[in-house]
Amino acid sequence: AYVYFNNGLPPSATVSAARMTIGAVAVRPFEESIPVNAMLIPERTIYLDTVEGGRVVKRHEEDGTYVTAGTPLITLRNKSLELDVMYRESQYSQLLSSIAQAQIAFDQNMLRYAQDLMNAELEINLTRADLDRRLPRDVTGVPQSEIDRLEAELSYRERSYATIAAAKERDTANAARNLDQLKQSVARMEASIDLVRESLDGLTLRAPIDGEVSALTTEVGEVLAPGARVAQIDETGAFIVRAQINEFYLGRLTMGQTAQTTINGEPYTLSIDKIYPTVENREFAADLRFVDRTPDGLRRGQSLQLRVALGEQAEYLTIPTGAFYEETGGQYVYVLDPSSNSAEKRDVVLGRRGADQIQVISGLNAGEDVITSSYSTFAERNRVRIEQPSRS
């Protein structure tokens, strides 16, 4: 107790060699990289929403099944929509009947005008022939008054013909305009009915692409509102890897940087395809794609462990990484003496971290050995004695 309270902690501690890990200081190929958690997501996902609401009357497929484009998934029923279709079809029939009646009236008017024009033309011809027979007056001896009467009658017949012809032309134009408006109304009504029927057909929701159905949770009898999310279709065979990376590395990542992962014991290389600048919970997202080859049997949501390279490979003085780094922040290490019976605390300056190595900037020399396991039992003493295992 006297030594403890007057001189502080003892200058050394004893640690079993079996409980520590030793790493050599050496010049090695070094590539700075960071471990990253990632998840597989489909490259293309189509979300299926209701356009018109309704009650679910049939569920055609189950969640997780593979479907082709056009496959029915669920069928809804909307009585209001059905009544709307019936009402519009009834209006359409009435409009067609109005067009037919207008066409009949037009044809009858044209027939009447044709008869009136024929009669007027006949009267003109008869009057003109009668006048021609009575001329010249000095030869036929017909009184001038009779000649004047026939000429006036001929002029009247001609004006009457012109009036009928003008009336025919005017009524023809009006009838044609009215028929054109009715036909336009029919066209609009047809388009309206097509839209309503399309909405009615849309009550059967179908897969828009080939893929795997997911999030299909609706049940028969359930009432869905317009715009309700029904399911999603994930395009199979094409995946991207979505990684969540600490915001500290946002400025150090660029498009095209590579990453490594292992799936079913096989190594695969990926390349950064997109970086999302938005930071949430001190992390940002990046999308990666497989390079050269894609593993088989990938599934949506599958987790991957990646190691993203932050720079080119080069030769540096390094030490193996270990638990000591998290405890010391890389400010000091314990260096073994040549006999390996003890280790001395030494201040160091460490640089970048790689997959399994840490760059040494100063404080260590090639050929030295350091303790890379936890320092939790050392209590920051200046020296630790290493207890070698006994030999039997």
Image: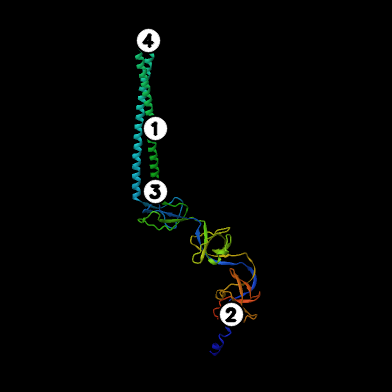
Q: Amino acid at mark 3?
A: Ser
Instruction: Measure the alpha-carbon separation of dots 3 and 2.
Output: 77 Å
**Contact, CB < 8 Å: mark 4 with mark 3?**
no
Percent coordinates x, y for residue 74 in the rendering = 40, 53
- Neighbourhood count class around disc 1 (C-alpha, 10 Å): few under 14, some 14–19, many 20 upward: few
Task: Tell me which label, 3 or 2, sits earlier in the chain.
Answer: 2
Q: How many marks?
A: 4
Quarter of the image with the C terminus in it: bottom right
Q: Is residue 50 above or below residue 22?
A: above
Residue tagged 4: 140
Tell me, yes or no, whether the two marked residues, 4 and 1, touch with CB atoms within 8 Å. Answer: no
Query: If you read the primary sequence from the N terminus, does the residue marked by circle 4 or circle 2 appear first?
Result: 2
Find the distance from the CA under tag 4 to the CA under tag 1.
Answer: 48 Å
Relative to 201, 288 lies left or right = right
For disc 2, the marked residue is 17
Tell me: 35 left or right of 85. right
Q: Which mark is residue 118?
A: none
Which mark is on residue 199? 3
> Do callouts 3 and 1 mark residues in contact (Cβ within 8 Å)?
no
* Label 3 element class: helix
Disc nearer the start of the sequence (1/2): 2
| Percent coordinates x, y for residue 260 in the rendering | 57, 63
